Image (cartoon, grey):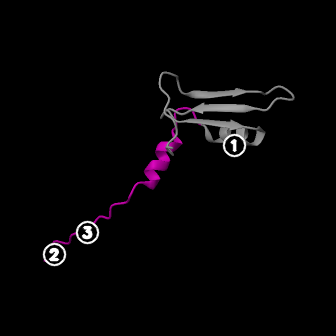
Amino acid sequence: MSEQPPLVTGIPAGLTIRGLDRDQTPTADWLCSCRRHERATGRTAVQQLLARARAGVCPHREEQAVLAPVIPIRRIDREAS
Protein backbone atom coordinates (compact mmCIF):
# COMPACT_ATOMS: atom_id res chain seq x y z
CA MET A 1 0.00 0.00 0.00
CA SER A 2 1.24 3.50 -0.80
CA GLU A 3 2.43 5.79 1.98
CA GLN A 4 1.48 8.94 0.07
CA PRO A 5 -1.73 10.76 1.02
CA PRO A 6 -4.53 10.66 -1.55
CA LEU A 7 -4.69 13.53 -4.03
CA VAL A 8 -8.15 15.01 -4.52
CA THR A 9 -9.16 17.01 -7.60
CA GLY A 10 -12.34 18.87 -8.52
CA ILE A 11 -13.08 20.02 -4.96
CA PRO A 12 -11.99 23.49 -3.79
CA ALA A 13 -9.45 23.67 -0.96
CA GLY A 14 -10.79 24.50 2.47
CA LEU A 15 -11.70 23.39 5.97
CA THR A 16 -14.96 21.71 6.99
CA ILE A 17 -15.92 21.04 10.61
CA ARG A 18 -18.83 18.84 11.70
CA GLY A 19 -20.18 17.51 14.99
CA LEU A 20 -19.98 20.63 17.11
CA ASP A 21 -23.32 19.97 18.84
CA ARG A 22 -23.48 18.52 22.33
CA ASP A 23 -22.83 14.77 22.60
CA GLN A 24 -21.27 14.60 19.11
CA THR A 25 -17.68 13.83 18.18
CA PRO A 26 -16.17 16.77 16.28
CA THR A 27 -14.62 15.95 12.91
CA ALA A 28 -12.62 18.28 10.68
CA ASP A 29 -11.62 17.73 7.04
CA TRP A 30 -8.95 19.94 5.53
CA LEU A 31 -8.15 19.94 1.83
CA CYS A 32 -4.92 21.89 1.43
CA SER A 33 -4.18 24.02 -1.63
CA CYS A 34 -1.65 21.36 -2.69
CA ARG A 35 -4.61 18.89 -2.72
CA ARG A 36 -3.56 16.84 0.32
CA HIS A 37 -6.41 15.78 2.57
CA GLU A 38 -6.26 15.53 6.35
CA ARG A 39 -9.02 14.40 8.71
CA ALA A 40 -9.09 14.95 12.46
CA THR A 41 -11.57 13.27 14.80
CA GLY A 42 -12.02 14.27 18.43
CA ARG A 43 -11.84 17.61 20.20
CA THR A 44 -8.07 17.74 20.72
CA ALA A 45 -7.22 16.53 17.22
CA VAL A 46 -9.62 19.05 15.65
CA GLN A 47 -8.10 21.89 17.71
CA GLN A 48 -4.61 20.89 16.57
CA LEU A 49 -5.71 20.77 12.93
CA LEU A 50 -7.37 24.18 13.24
CA ALA A 51 -4.15 25.62 14.66
CA ARG A 52 -2.14 24.19 11.73
CA ALA A 53 -4.49 24.89 8.80
CA ARG A 54 -3.98 28.25 7.11
CA ALA A 55 -5.83 29.57 4.08
CA GLY A 56 -3.51 30.07 1.13
CA VAL A 57 -0.45 28.68 2.95
CA CYS A 58 0.71 25.14 2.25
CA PRO A 59 2.73 23.66 5.14
CA HIS A 60 3.39 20.55 3.04
CA ARG A 61 5.39 22.52 0.49
CA GLU A 62 7.29 24.26 3.30
CA GLU A 63 8.15 20.83 4.76
CA GLN A 64 9.39 19.68 1.37
CA ALA A 65 11.56 22.80 1.07
CA VAL A 66 13.08 22.17 4.49
CA LEU A 67 13.73 18.52 3.66
CA ALA A 68 15.28 19.29 0.27
CA PRO A 69 18.97 18.47 0.03
CA VAL A 70 21.35 21.35 0.53
CA ILE A 71 23.96 21.70 -2.19
CA PRO A 72 27.21 23.12 -0.83
CA ILE A 73 28.65 26.09 -2.69
CA ARG A 74 32.41 26.23 -3.11
CA ARG A 75 34.11 29.56 -3.06
CA ILE A 76 36.73 30.03 -5.75
CA ASP A 77 39.50 32.48 -4.95
CA ARG A 78 41.01 33.86 -8.13
CA GLU A 79 44.01 35.29 -6.29
CA ALA A 80 45.07 31.85 -5.03
CA SER A 81 45.98 30.60 -8.52
Q: Which residue is mark 1?
A: 48
Numbered badge on residue 75? 3
Q: Is residue 67 left or right of residue 30?
A: left
Q: Please, is residue 24 above or below residue 2 in the view?
A: above
Numbered badge on residue 10? none
- Local SS, label 3: loop
- Local SS, label 2: loop
Q: What's the residue type where badge 3 is placed?
A: Arg
Q: CA distance from mark 3 to mark 2?
A: 12 Å
Q: CA distance from mark 3 to mark 1?
A: 44 Å
The residue under the point 66% across, 39% down is: 49
Numbered badge on residue 79? 2
The residue under the point 17% across, 78% down is: 80
Q: Main secondary structure of the magenta part?
A: loop
Front position among marks 3 and 2: 3
The residue under the point 82% across, 25% down is: 21
x then y, percent, for residue 59: 53, 43
Q: Is residue 65 magenta?
A: yes
Magenta part of the protein: which range?
Answer: 54-81
Q: Are marks 1 and 2 in contact (CB under 8 Å)?
A: no
User: How many numbered discs?
Assistant: 3
Residue nearest the viewer, comparing 56 with 17: 17
Q: Please, is residue 17 above or below residue 52 in the view?
A: above
Judge the density around disc 1: few (<14), some (14-19), many (≥20) Cα neighbours within 10 Å: few
Front position among marks 3 and 1: 1
Q: Is residue 71 left or right of residue 45?
A: left
Among numbered discs 3 and 1, the one appearing first in the sequence: 1
The residue under the point 72% across, 32% down is: 27
Q: Please, is residue 30 above or below residue 69 in the view?
A: above
Q: What's the residue type where badge 2 is placed?
A: Glu
